[in-house]
């Protein structure tokens, strides 16, 4: 289904490639702060560093000039580490200098890092100090020629990042203009991203600069940011969701990006950096929402808060919006400036979306995959529908294949942001690509207004003996609303040859359970949760009833983007 162009909210300026992207922004906003971050020396108080777009562009050019002098033009350069300024400059120095960037997952074990470096045929890597020992060993059996450390190191075989940057600056001062001579072809592979591999061996996704730039332009036609915005970067930056939305899309608008100190510091960092835009995954938002309401209940203000929500909703219908004032104490917990949250990577319960909206924080729900650069659909600044994953981008075609009686089928996508294919894997490419259409592996449907809805991964769908499809994510959203439930996973177990039994593995919050129910044994907690599950079952058709539960206080195994590794968990629960 092709979208009507009338749904475009803003006329977004096109960008051809990453060099044009950074040049455009650095020219428009040279003195705008691009990055804010802290550096610590020993036990001293942290020093806050602000880098302008003008300086950022110069650092990209300097770093790229040295990499080219090292003979890396056209070669692959890997990068691995936390979200930090050196990661961002490396990504753009490589791609704007005619090289291919290979972002690696910072949470991978050493054997997988080795495998991906070998498979990608990278000839250089830029990494943090903690990876040096492993990378030095990998160098002995791979194509790696250069190891560049983002941190100070005494390793003789390792080049210091600051030295590379300094050398590039000197070369440019001496008249070296090799960087400017590079002609960027936006249609060839410039980025090699490995999928998270939750159900199978990771595949190398080949993306071009045109893939990503076309995606950025389309998103910018739906949702606006400005130089007044500050983004908090905390999701793994190697992943295409954080990389495109926070990093590259942020550059497009000239926003300021602040780097998070870690998952447990989100709230603190939002306060100190006065964050206005937050990019998150559902699990993080679900936990924030629960904590907010837990705090409200502990103060005995649940009734008052619900009344205030009802009043502000009624006033909004006559165009009076008092949410920011009425719920200022809640907004102040997140720095007082938060205005919008982009959420993706998995469906979010519409009750959570409505909960944030009630407090005056808009949520923009979106959907995408690594293979689509990544965004396929998102809500716009004018059109939102809680529970959906937004409207397909105007420059993409989206259709539902092999629909069932409810109109649910596999989501397929065609357009400029669809990948070039899988690296050295023609079989996988042919399996997922047909006449330019990419099969996402996700089930969903499109409503009469054109909004896209997702029901779950094709591989996760539970098919009952009677042929009915059960989408576990729907049931998990209900279970996750229970008072002491942190997260859950619904799966099938064959009871006998004639029946399939739905089971749920449930992670409970130990601290919250004590506050609500006092000291209880795991067996007693299981009975409390089971009684609540039985109440959920009463609201569902028989085929969707949960028949067995497993409880634990150990978090479910996840990828770095907080997607549950279902296969791994089901194997443990068998």
Image: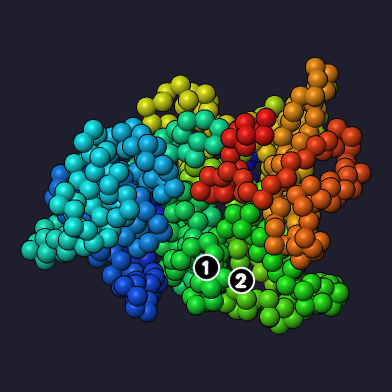
* Quadrant for the C terminus in the image: top right
The residue positioned farthest toward the right in the image shown: 538
The answer to whether residue 132 is left or right of residue 307 is left
Q: Which mark is residue 339?
A: 2
Q: Earlier in the sequence, mark 2 or mark 1?
A: 1
The residue positioned farthest toward the top in the image shown: 497
Given this view, does label 2 or label 1 mark the residue nearer the observer?
Answer: 1
Q: Residues within 10 Å of mark 2 (few under 14, many from 20)?
A: some
Residue 518, x across and y down, in percent: 79, 63
Identity of the residue drawn at 58% across and 39% down = 565
Report whether residue 322 is seen.
Answer: no
- Nearer to me, 130 or 479: 130
Residue 372, x across and y down, in percent: 51, 42
The answer to whether residue 43 is left or right of residue 322 is left
The answer to whether residue 35 is left or right of residue 150 is right
Identity of the residue drawn at 57% across and 70% down = 267
The answer to whether residue 183 is left or right of residue 317 is left
The residue positioned farthest toward the left in the image shown: 174
SS at badge 1? helix
Provide the residue designation for mark 1.
265
Identity of the residue drawn at 53% across and 73% down = 268
Identity of the residue drawn at 32% across and 49% down = 131
SS at badge 2? loop
Residue 108, x across and y down, in percent: 42, 43
Do labels 2 and 1 touch, CB within 8 Å? no
Kindly indicate the quadrant of the structure image that contains residue 557: top right
Residue 507, x across and y down, in percent: 69, 49
């Amino acid at each position: 289904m092709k979208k009507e162009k009338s749904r475009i909210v803003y006329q977004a300026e096109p960008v051809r490639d990453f060099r044009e992207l950074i040049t455009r922004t650095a020219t428009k906003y040279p003195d705008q702060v691009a990055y804010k971050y802290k550096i610590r020396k020993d036990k001293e108080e942290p020093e806050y560093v602000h880098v302008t777009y003008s300086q950022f562009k110069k650092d990209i050019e300097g770093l790229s000039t040295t990499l080219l002098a090292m003979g890396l033009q056209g070669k692959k350069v890997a990068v691995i580490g936390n979200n930090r300024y050196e990661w961002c400059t490396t990504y753009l120095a490589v791609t704007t200098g005619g090289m291919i960037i290979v972002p690696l997952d910072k949470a991978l074990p050493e054997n997988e890092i080795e495998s991906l470096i070998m498979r990608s045929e990278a000839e250089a890597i830029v990494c943090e100090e903690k990876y040096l020992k492993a990378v030095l060993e990998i160098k002995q059996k791979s194509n790696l020629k250069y190891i560049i450390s983002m941190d100070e190191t005494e390793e003789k075989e390792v080049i210091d990042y600051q030295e590379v940057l300094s050398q590039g600056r000197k070369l440019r001062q001496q008249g070296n203009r090799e960087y400017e001579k590079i002609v960027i072809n936006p249609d060839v592979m410039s980025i090699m991203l490995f999928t998270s591999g939750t159900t199978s061996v990771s595949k190398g996704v080949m993306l071009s600069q045109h893939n990503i730039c076309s995606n950025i332009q389309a998103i910018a036609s739906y949702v606006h940011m400005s130089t007044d915005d500050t983004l908090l970067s905390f999701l793994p930056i190697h992943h295409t969701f954080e990389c495109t939305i926070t990093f590259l899309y942020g550059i497009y608008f000239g926003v300021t990006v602040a780097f998070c100190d870690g998952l447990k510091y989100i709230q603190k960092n939002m306060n100190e950096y006065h964050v206005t835009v937050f990019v998150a995954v559902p699990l993080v938002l679900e936990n924030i929402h629960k904590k907010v309401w837990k705090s409200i209940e502990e103060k005995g203000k649940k009734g008052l808060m619900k009344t205030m929500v009802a009043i502000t909703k009624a006033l909004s219908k006559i165009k009076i919006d008092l949410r920011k004032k009425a719920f200022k104490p809640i907004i102040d917990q997140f720095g007082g400036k938060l205005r919008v949250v982009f959420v993706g990577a998995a469906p979010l319960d519409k009750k959570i979306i409505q909960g944030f909206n009630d407090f005056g924080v808009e949520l923009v729900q979106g959907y995408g995959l690594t293979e689509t650069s990544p965004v396929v659909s998102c809500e716009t600044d004018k059109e939102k529908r809680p529970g959906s994953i937004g409207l397909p981008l105007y420059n993409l075609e989206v259709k539902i294949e092999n629909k069932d009686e409810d109109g649910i089928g596999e989501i397929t996508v065609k357009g400029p942001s669809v990948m070039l294919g899988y690296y050295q894997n023609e079989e996988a490419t042919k399996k997922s690509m047909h006449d330019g259409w990419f099969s996402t592996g996700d089930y969903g449907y499109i409503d009469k207004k054109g909004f896209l809805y997702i029901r779950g991964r094709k591989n996760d769908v539970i098919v009952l003996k009677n042929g009915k499809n059960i989408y576990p994510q729907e049931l998990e959203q209900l279970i996750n609303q229970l008072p002491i439930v942190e997260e859950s996973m619904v799966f099938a177990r064959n009871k006998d040859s004639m029946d399939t039994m739905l089971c749920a593995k449930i992670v409970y919050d130990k601290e919250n359970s004590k506050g609500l129910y006092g000291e209880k044994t795991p067996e007693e907690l299981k009975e409390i949760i089971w009684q609540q599950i039985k109440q959920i079952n009463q609201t569902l058709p028989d085929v969707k009833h949960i028949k067995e539960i497993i409880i634990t206080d150990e978090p479910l195994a996840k990828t770095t983007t907080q997607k549950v590794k279902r296969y791994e968990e089901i194997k443990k629960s068998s």
